[in-house]
Image (cartoon, rainbow, N blue to C red):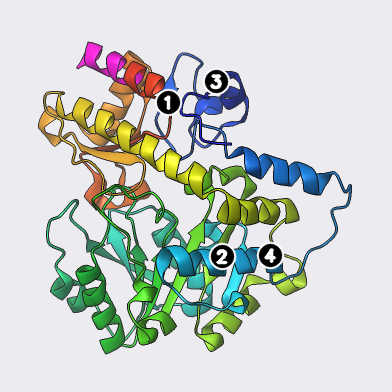
Amino acid sequence: MTFNPNHIEKSILQKNAYNLRWAEVNEDVIPLTAADLDLPCAPQIIMAIQKFAANHCFNYGPAAGMPELKNAFANYLFRKKDVVVSPENILPVDSAAFGIYLTCKTLLKTGDEAIVFDPVDYLFRYSVEAVGGKAISFSIPPGTDKVDFAAMEDLITPKTKLICLCNPLNPTGKVFTKSELFQLAFIAEKHNLIILSDEIWSDIVFAPHTFTCIASLDESINKRTIIVTGLSKSYGLAGLRIGAVICSNDSIFQNLQQHSLHHTTIHGVNILSQVAATTALNDCDEWLDQFVAHLHKMRTICANELNAIKGISCMAPQGCYVAFADIRKTGMSSKEMHQLLLEEAKVAVVPGLKEWFGAGAEGYIRISFATSEEIIKEAFTRIRHIM
């Protein structure tokens, strides 16, 4: 059973797809907003859920996560990311978002500082500040422009405890090179900092670019890295709320488990989500490869269409299925462009607002292209008519 790039059920999306998407806009609007799939997940995942549900039993699962899922994550990390980690050092959580928050909760005390990229998804800053920490912004240029790691090091103070790495980087789509990761890791080791590596996008990378997991560089870097990942982007499981926190440092991992409250049953991951994730990691490689090939095509269409509009430029993202378009030459702000496209073209995009991505996002809009060719072309036909 393979990926179908044209299988879009608008009536289902208009009922079920929230978070700025089909269920939250007027029926005549095309939402290229939240980074979520318009396309259904792999059939194998549905079959696995149905098979489990047929037992008619939904008992408590193990607080540390189902062994089958922990083993699936360990095997996945080894064969796809060149990372060796024991299944016992993998904690399934109810989303990568919670994994980011849990890491900050575990490592930061009131007044501690964490370096957070700009632009980047707001969840990093939110999580740091929610536990009493201070987010220190570090500007990351898009594309292949050089990252000023000396400037990053200048931001470090005695209060700095954490470097938040998002690789690939949402919203710009930058995929960090191995050389860049070694520079970041050198700084972390020099100043005895922990690296939080958000890798939820790591399977969505477009050739010739390749993903390198920072924990794979060497054993010492592995021991100071906490990997956070999830299955919403690669496998379309956002509503199932399933991810993982992975750390080979036993002491840090035990603290993560303690702060997760999984042992109290206050928090934890539901069983059906774990069944779905296990199947995705073990049995859906072919589906994922076909999905990424489809995204590669949508990426080309999206970048070409954006660059053909006067005043707009967009570097094709190296990873992620979002395009980050520079609109500054149009003379409009991100919010103004968002409103124009929504009201006149009936296309919803994400404006580059500070509260969502940081100050560096102003003058940009973000467009998700995890949809069908028909929908993405219709969206740009509408946009061309008003620009």
What's under tag 2, amino acid-wise? Phe
Local secondary structure at mark 4: helix
In percent of the image, x 53 and y 52: which residue is there?
Answer: 231
Q: Which mark is residue 73?
A: 2
| Of the image marks 1 and 2, the number of the one nearer the N terminus | 2
Tell which tag, 1 or 4, sits nearer the viewer: 4
Mark 1 surroundings: few (<14), some (14-19) or many (≥20) residues within 10 A: many
Disc assigned to residue 251: none
Q: Secondary structure at mark 3?
A: helix
Could you give the CA–CA distance between mark 1 and mark 4, rounded to whole angstroms?
33 Å
Which of labels 1 and 3 is toward the front? 1
Q: Are marks 1 and 2 in contact (CB under 8 Å)?
A: no
| Residue 102 in sight in this render | no
Residue 329 on the magenta segment: no
* Residue 281 visible in the picture: yes
Seen at 50% across and 85% down, the residue is 249
Q: Residues within 10 Å of mark 2 (few under 14, many from 20)?
A: many
Could you tell whether 349 is left or right of 150 in the image?
right
Q: Provide the residue span drawn in magenta.
A: 379-387
Residue ID at (37%, 70%): 134
> How far separated are the C-alphas under marks 3 and 2?
33 Å
Task: Provide the major secondary structure of the magenta segment.
Answer: helix
Q: Which part of the image, by quadrant, shows the C terminus?
A: top left
Mark 4, other Cα within 10 Å: few <14 / some 14–19 / many ≥20: some
The residue type indicated by label 1 comes to: Ser
The kind of residue tagged 4 is Glu
- Left of 16 or right of it: where is 117? left
| Residue occupied by mark 1 | 372
Residue 205, horizontal then vertical, whole percent: 33, 50
Residue receiving disc 3: 10
Q: Return the x and y of residue 117 as percentages of the image width and height.
A: 29, 61
> Disc 4 designates what residue?
68
